Amino acid sequence: MGRRAGSISAPVVVLVLAVALSACSGGEVTNASGSTSASVPQVSTTSTESPSASVSASSVSGNRATCKDSSADAEIDAGEVRRVVLEHKGDALKVTFKLADSFPESGTFSALLNVTNTDGSTSRQLGAKWLDGELIGYFIFDSAEARQQNLDGQPVVDGKVVTAAFPWTAVSDLGAVWNWSATTTVEGDDADYCPEPGAEVLNPKQARFPSS
């Protein structure tokens, strides 16, 4: 099965009605990143107002979703993912990548979260990119508007664990339940996915937030 290029997905949002379906195998992770946490970054670029949400998405702080990947199936070993955890923490979306090996200290490496509303009409990519271990990009990219917001601050890297915090507003217009997938890239090429996209390139598998 060939890998697809890093897809762009949409953000997440706030709704007291948290209806969710689990989309990834595996149970919950009580503390994927140990005591490590990332503060909520601020958008450093001027942008137009975010669309107002007729329905707030997953508004209950503490909602979460988990994807596990126990197989050694990455096309590039340095990007092998074991687990990805999403959690609504106050005004932030906390995203934790657990890698199979230590964080790559040479070359380029990206950790990307693709989010979309359930009908696929809104999609965004939340991500971070490093060069030789130094952060060179921390952003939210809106595919419909072809607009990127660059964030201040930086994710926390601790051995095999990468923890990033994105403003909850990045996903607050996606609905009570939304879809997501995670991707790592190495030297610009897709390395691993969680969940695995499956055979349908135009209809890849996604997880749901929040998980039930």
Image (cartoon, helix red, strand yellow):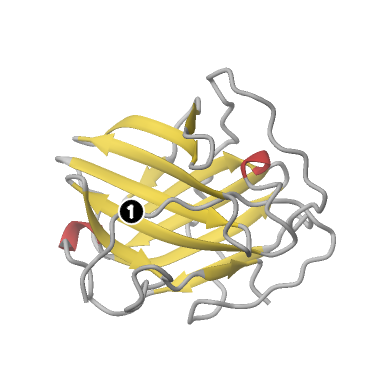
Residue 122 seen anywhere in this rendered image of the structure: yes
Q: In the displayed structure, does residue 23 sit left or right of residue 155?
A: right
Which residue is more in the foreground, 24 or 101?
Answer: 24
Residue 63 point in image, percent of width and height:
70, 62
Residue 166 in which image quadrant: top right
Q: Is residue 176 left or right of residue 197?
A: right
Q: Establish if 150 lies above or below 88.
A: above
Who's the residue at 32% across and 38% down the image?
129
Q: In this view, does 174 lie to the left or right of 165?
A: right
Residue found 34% across the figure and 69% down from its top = 201
In this view, the residue in front, 183 or 88, is: 183
Identify the image quadrant of the C terminus: bottom right
Q: Quadrant of residue 210?
A: bottom right
Where in the figure is residue 29, as x and y percent of width and height? 54, 70
Q: Mark 1: which secondary structure? A: loop
- Reading the image, the residue beneath label 1 is 6
Q: Report the front residue among 112 and 120.
A: 120
Quadrant housing residue 179: bottom right
Q: Look at the image and tell me whether residue 160 can be seen.
A: no
Q: What's the residue type where badge 1 is placed?
A: Gly
